[in-house]
Image (cartoon, grey):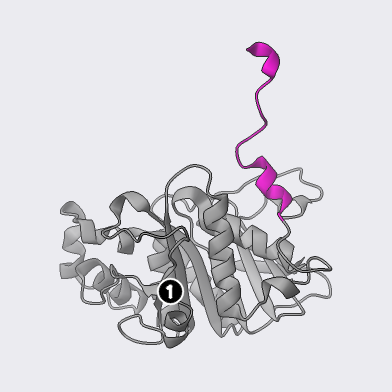
Amino acid sequence: MEFALVDGKNFHPDCSTLPALSIGNVGQLSVDLLVSSTAAERVAYLDEPSVLLALATTPTGWCPRVTSPFPLKVPYDSPSNGLTFIQQRSPVVKGLMLDFAKNVADFAASIGKKHILILSSLDSGIRKRIHASSDVQIYYISSTSSEGNDEECERLGWKRLEEYSPSQRRWMYLHSLAEGNPSPELASFEDDLEDDDYCPGLPFAALFCFCKAKGLKVTCALCYCSEGDNVSDSLQLAGAACSLLGLSLEKLPGTEGGGWIIPCSWQNMYGPPPDLSIF
């Protein structure tokens, strides 16, 4: 993965927050919300060959001089918080997800990142238990222990993702690939997929395993959702990220009085409304 820094800018070494593409695009929506609300500034452009190019809006408007597609990942830094946000605008080329995850992990390690926070979503149609609550339940896995547990996440009321099991065959296969010791025996499940193979087959799982193999601290914050209007889910996932990162919603630097700043990219989520004269 190649990158070009904006003049006079650099990466903060603390935490990088990035989305992993999944159902409802909740991770991407949350990152845009965090970028706009923390007054983060673009610091670089990333070029990654395993992803498609895209034309898209930024959290604050259209990219300047958009005359051709740009790389999918754009890093933003919030200087007052020492945080980096990396946004993903387009999907990974089919069959190259593992290459992509490896390149992201290599990049994060090369710029001295200490903590990677991955925001993503899970299909509510496959959840095993339903919690009776009006709030979105945040689930997590962390690299701080072999079983994925983390005391800080538990303190915030998050629940460890039950579907994460290091001894499950596909999770084992991912970890072995990330560590450079792939086992042919573990790869035999591809023709016989089971329900437990769903989560380790998602982008967040590959990113988690490869970043962990690099010795980075990794936390995945996840929520269940469906396709459709996921603004509420995105607000709550972004709020959960703020809690973990130590950001106070009342003191976000994006506005004078604090609080969320809805990014202009959210205005284009569903396209323009139809011309009412046709009805």
What x and y, as percent, mark residue 144?
Answer: 41, 87
Magenta region? 262-279
**Which SS class for mark 1?**
loop
Residue 181 sits above or below residue 254 on the image: below
Along the viewing direction, whichever of 268 and 156 lies nearer the viewer: 156
What x and y, as percent, mark residue 214?
Answer: 45, 82
| Residue 54 appears in the figure | yes
What x and y, as percent, mark residue 70?
Answer: 67, 51
Image quadrant in which the N terminus is located: bottom right
Residue at 56% x, 57% y is: 234
Residue at 20% x, 69% y is: 169
Name the residue carrying label 1. Answer: 158
Residue 219 is left or right of residue 74, and the answer is left
Residue 86 is left or right of residue 151, and the answer is right
Q: Quadrant of residue 173?
A: bottom left
Q: Is residue 231 part of the magenta span, yes or no?
A: no
Along the viewing direction, whichever of 28 and 132 lies nearer the viewer: 132
| Residue 45 appears in the figure | no
What x and y, as percent, mark residue 171?
Answer: 27, 70
Q: Is residue 265 part of the magenta span, yes or no?
A: yes
Along the viewing direction, whichever of 113 and 15 lies nearer the viewer: 15
Residue at 47% x, 69% y is: 221
